[in-house]
Image (cartoon, helix red, strand yellow):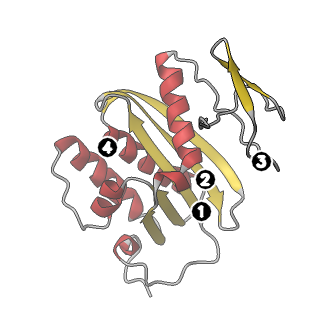
Amino acid sequence: MPSRPGDLFTSEAAKTPDQYLIAHIDGGARGNPGPAGYGVVIQDESGKKVAMLSEYLGHQTNNFAEYQGLIAALEYAIQHGSRALKVISDSELMVRQIKGIYKVKNPTLQDLHARAKQVIRQLEWFSIGHVLRGKNQEADRLANEAMDKGTGRARVPSPPTISFSQTEFEGIVRDGKIELIDGNLPDNIRVQVRVKR
């Protein structure tokens, strides 16, 4: 049972409430420091998506962007009447700083850390956890889109993921290009080529 609202970022022992928001957050900077942005995907406790947030932050560090994503998620929860929030981030540093495992030494991050803790204290239940980047892809995509938009870059879409019943094809090289002998593949699909001897 929680002793005070906002204390749960140091303990996962308290029972998860029936209603809460889940925020997948990510922040990044190209160059670190460089053009920076964050992305946040908000879901309800059943996993239904309720909001997507992103913002270009100008010339900042990666850690600055991670904290801005956290603060955006926290403020969204408060502004929309939720008193329970589960945050999922691929920034192990930020997660450990919020949990009190690591100290925050950078003065700019100290201010952001203090702001995040201030909002956390307004919640009745809070949880934060670390995942690998591969499990945080949508938030990462939003952060990258924010950086692209802020810098005027058009993002080239990734090739579509397609499953095939046939995974090996025969082909020959003519004029530096591979021509398939026994099948067809759609344009822009990534392939790996092995040369048979």
Q: Where is residue 118 in the image (x, y as percent from the top left)?
A: 34, 58
Q: Position of residue 51 (x, y in %)?
A: 65, 47
Tag 4–tag 3 contact (CB < 8 Å): no
Q: Is residue 34 left or right of residue 161?
A: left
Within 10 angstroms of label 4, few (less than 14), some, or many (20 or more) residues? many
Which element carries disc 2, helix, strand or loop?
strand
Which element carries disc 4, helix, strand or loop?
helix
Residue occupied by mark 2: 42
- At a point 74% along the width and 46% down the height, the residue shown is 167
Q: In which quarter of the image is the N terminus?
A: bottom left
Label 1 and label 4: CA atoms lie apart by: 23 Å
Q: Which of marks 2 and 1 is nearer the N terminus?
A: 1
Tag 2–tag 1 contact (CB < 8 Å): yes
Q: Give amino acid for label 2.
A: Ile
- At a point 54% along the width and 22% down the height, the residue shown is 149
Q: Which of marks 2 and 4 is nearer the N terminus?
A: 2
Q: Which of 90 and 165 is in front in this view?
A: 165
